[in-house]
């Protein structure tokens, strides 16, 4: 299905279908690149560090888990304190994951265990990391990734609010927009044959600010060695322990990366959208985005209909709305005049 080819009546019919569609947790998301790796930081409240330690010591977790400061096995889950939430909470990080049944099953088990013992993620974040080796030194791909993020930033933020209709309170502190950064010289990445050009543009008076941005690529360069892990960090997602939402979040960015390195992007169209975009940096204004752009992004990133359906359902928060609520949303999205 080509989303951007649908007429108004077909979009309305699709919204009604999606409102009744249940997100399912999948065994695999079918990433078309066996080298794709990712990981997740699960921030949560309801359990303090000592509570988690007690659960670990009493073998309450289904999976092996270790203190992040004393970890001896990089293939296990790790726990630590987390101070970026409204009140002090905890964080559990996954090991490096791939699109494999075992990895997805283990993530589900960890989310279920945390929920069972009283953890909740409201007001927190769920940061994602993707192995930057997938792009490597393909500087055209880096340029296109950053241009896509900037061009469709409002849509990406709304999608990554997950089950929520709005961002968490701390998002402007720890995951702010990059639309106000001086990216008019972005093509220097290719000319200089190095990512440092764009990283310097993303600095504030020469100071590293990766942990303040919605997408953090500082970890890719050893120039900023304190954070070097060769990963792209997506810091936007609202906190959640719903494994279906986490999987959907990972699916979007992993498929976006796949699209970027495929060589099949309509670069002329992207450049036109990027160069003529409205620069909006206030996240509070991000809920006003063009549905045609949302449809185009879905077609750009996804191949399968089910991926597109899950993307639109989460983007537009089509979660069992009443007929009245759904009709109001459709009128607002499609800008239909009554």
Image (cartoon, rainbow, N blue to C red):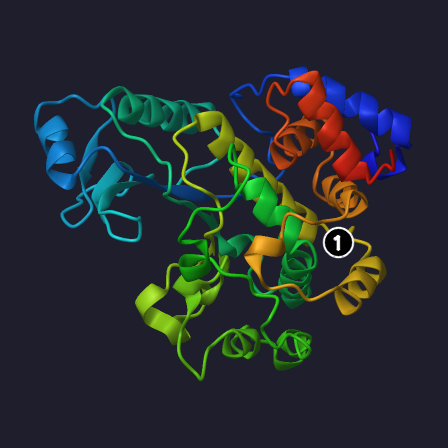
234 lies above or below 273: above
- Asked whether the viewer can see residue 48, the reply is yes
Horizontal arrangement in the rendering, residue 255 relative to residue 205 (left or right): right
What residue is shown with label 1? 263
Which quadrant of the view contains residue 276? bottom right
- Asked whether the viewer can see residue 304, the reply is no
The percent position of residue 79, horizontal first and vertical second, equals 22, 41
Horizontal arrangement in the rendering, residue 126 relative to residue 159 (left or right): left
Mark 1 lies on a secondary structure that is: loop
321 lies above or below 36: above
Q: Residue at x 31, y 68 (%)?
A: 226
**How many numbered discs, if any?**
1
Horizontal arrangement in the rendering, residue 51 relative to residue 327 (left or right): left
Disc 1 residue crowd, few under 14, some 14–19, many 20+, Cα 10 Å:
few
Nearer-the-camera pick, 186 or 16? 16
The percent position of residue 337, horizontal first and vertical second, equals 87, 37
The percent position of residue 303, horizontal first and vertical second, equals 74, 34
Nearer-the-camera pick, 128 or 328? 328
Which quadrant of the view contains residue 298? top right
Q: From this viewpoint, which residue is outermost toward the bottom?
A: 205
312 lies above or below 87: above
Horizontal arrangement in the rendering, residue 302 relative to residue 247 (left or right): right
Q: Residue at x 66, y 15 (%)?
A: 20
Nearer-the-camera pick, 123 or 175? 123
Which quadrant of the view contains residue 137? bottom right
The quadrant the N terminus occupies is top right
Q: Residue at x 75, y 38 (%)?
A: 332
The percent position of residue 310, horizontal first and vertical second, equals 64, 28
């Amino acid at each position: 299905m080509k989303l951007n080819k649908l007429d108004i009546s077909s979009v309305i019919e699709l919204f009604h279908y999606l409102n009744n569609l249940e997100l399912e947790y999948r065994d695999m998301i079918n990433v078309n690149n066996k080298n794709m790796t990712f990981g997740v930081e699960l921030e949560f409240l309801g359990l303090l560090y000592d509570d988690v330690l007690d659960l670990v010591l009493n073998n309450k977790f289904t999976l092996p888990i270790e203190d992040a400061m004393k970890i001896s096995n990089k293939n296990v889950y790790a726990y630590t304190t987390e101070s970026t939430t409204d009140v002090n909470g905890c964080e559990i990080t996954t090991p490096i994951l791939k699109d494999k049944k075992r990895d997805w099953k283990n993530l589900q088990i960890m989310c279920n265990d945390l929920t069972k013992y009283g953890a909740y993620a409201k007001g927190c974040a769920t940061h994602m990391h993707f192995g930057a080796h997938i792009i490597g030194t393909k500087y055209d791909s880096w340029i296109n990734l950053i241009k896509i993020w900037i061009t469709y930033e409002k849509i990406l933020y709304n999608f990554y609010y997950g089950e929520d209709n709005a961002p968490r309170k701390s998002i402007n502190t720890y995951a702010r927009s990059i639309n106000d950064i001086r990216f008019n010289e972005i093509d220097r990445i290719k000319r200089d044959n190095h990512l440092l050009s764009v990283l310097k543009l993303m600095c504030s008076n020469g100071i590293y600010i990766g942990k303040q941005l919605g997408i953090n690529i500082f970890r890719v360069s050893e120039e900023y060695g304190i954070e070097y892990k060769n990963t792209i960090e997506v810091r936007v997602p609202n906190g959640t322990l719903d494994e279906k939402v986490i999987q959907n979040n990972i699916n979007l960015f992993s498929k976006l990366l796949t699209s970027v390195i495929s060589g099949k992007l309509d670069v002329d169209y992207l450049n036109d959208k990027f160069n003529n975009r409205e620069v909006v940096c206030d996240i509070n204004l991000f809920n006003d985005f063009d549905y045609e752009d949302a449809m185009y992004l879905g077609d750009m990133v996804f191949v399968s209909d089910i991926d597109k359906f899950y993307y639109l359902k989460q983007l537009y928060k089509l979660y069992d709305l009443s007929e009245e609520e759904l009709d109001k949303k459709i009128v607002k999205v499609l800008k239909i005049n009554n």
